[in-house]
Image (spheres, rainbow, N blue to C red):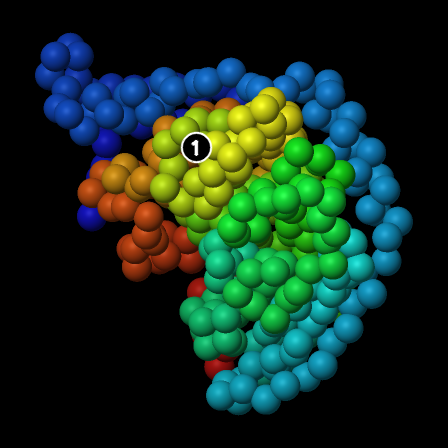
Amino acid sequence: MYLLIRRTVSFARGGCFNVEMDCERNELMNALDRRKNDLLAYNPSTTIEAEMLDRYWGEVLEQYSAKPLEVKREQVETMFPTVRAERLTYCGYDDTPIHCWLLLPQREQQRDPLPCIVTYPGYTLDKGQPERHAAWLQLGYAVLAVDVRGQGGETGSLLTQASGSVKGWVTQGITDIGSSYYLAVTMDAVRAVDAAAGQPEIDASRIAAVGGSQGGGLALLAAALNTKVSAVVADIPNMCNLDYGMLHSTGSLTELAAYVKRYPDQLNAVLDTLAYFDLLNLAERIAAPVLMSVGWKDTVCLPETVYAVFNRIRARKKINDYPFSGHEISEYQKSKAYEFIQTEFNFPRTSINA
């Protein structure tokens, strides 16, 4: 179910927004209206000074701008006769080769480079098989489907580890930002956009970062740190308001909570590292238009954490609320994502056979 809240929220490029309510008095609002108002008003303070954050990321991005991507491509056969499928690898944060699918719809008389969907998976998942991305291909988009290192796909990790961690991945190097898993996956995501932009079949001016849960967080991180991203779809995103998430989430952030439970004296070091990757702190760097979704019954990526970031984004933005959904992405929301990207890229609604 998609809830149309009885108010219009509009956002100008300058960052201002207006909320127009059709209720004359607050007491006329029902519980759903009140919940929406509370979420729109949720505005926790940032957890790191903006100057320190900008200086850090400026140095990291400058360092990696000179690091070769070393892209390799190998064509493979698929079920789709009208799609060219290739295994593409690029060099991620360290020397780890990140494995992807590069999928290119082959249309008759297709000469111009195609807009591209760079898609990131949820936690423990992977890039899947080419069939997973059939809808984007049918709409005529190129797709770069990216693995996350060390998780469920073909991509390993050469990240070194000098201290202990708990089960899972996110606590690796958590007290040392320079060797942290969060830095590695963030830069992998940023460099995926560069890898897509460098392919001759892809229109580098129309690259969308797309994902759900962990993938939604990585899509937003890519947009915050790579100006080549020109649109974002971030469904039920992770990496938002991370300190609040540590206290309340039932998802991957429980690994951080377990780490601090085991090593309580490391709490401040953990929070210091997380601050550099928390989208609460990076949201205002996002310049591309954004579509987000949130499930109000989500206990993994809680609505407060999602709205904490949404409320700070100053680019054009929209959020779809699903009051009765948990940690899930409905077919309805997927269709809204297709519509959003089609509109932002002004891309014709034609099939690959057109």
Question: Residue 12: x and y, percent?
Answer: 50, 26
Which of the pair 325/273 is nearer the observer? 273
Which of the pair 2/328 is nearer the observer? 328
Question: Residue 222: x and y, percent?
Answer: 63, 45
Q: Residue at x 73, y 21 (%)?
A: 52
Q: Residue at x 56, y 81 (%)?
A: 83
Q: Residue at x 82, y 46 (%)?
A: 64
Whether residue 222 is visible here, answered yes or no, is no
**Horizontally, is 210 left or right of 334 in the view?**
right
Which of the pair 342/310 is nearer the observer? 310
Looking at the image, residue 343 lies above or below residue 277: below
In the figure, residue 116 lies in which quadrant? Answer: bottom right
Q: Amino acid at mark 1?
A: Gly
**Horizontally, is 323 left or right of 289 in the view?**
left
- How busy is the neighbourhood of tag 1: few (under 14 within 10 Å), some, or many (20 plus)? many
Q: Which residue is mark 1?
A: 245
In the figure, residue 315 lies in which quadrant? Answer: top right
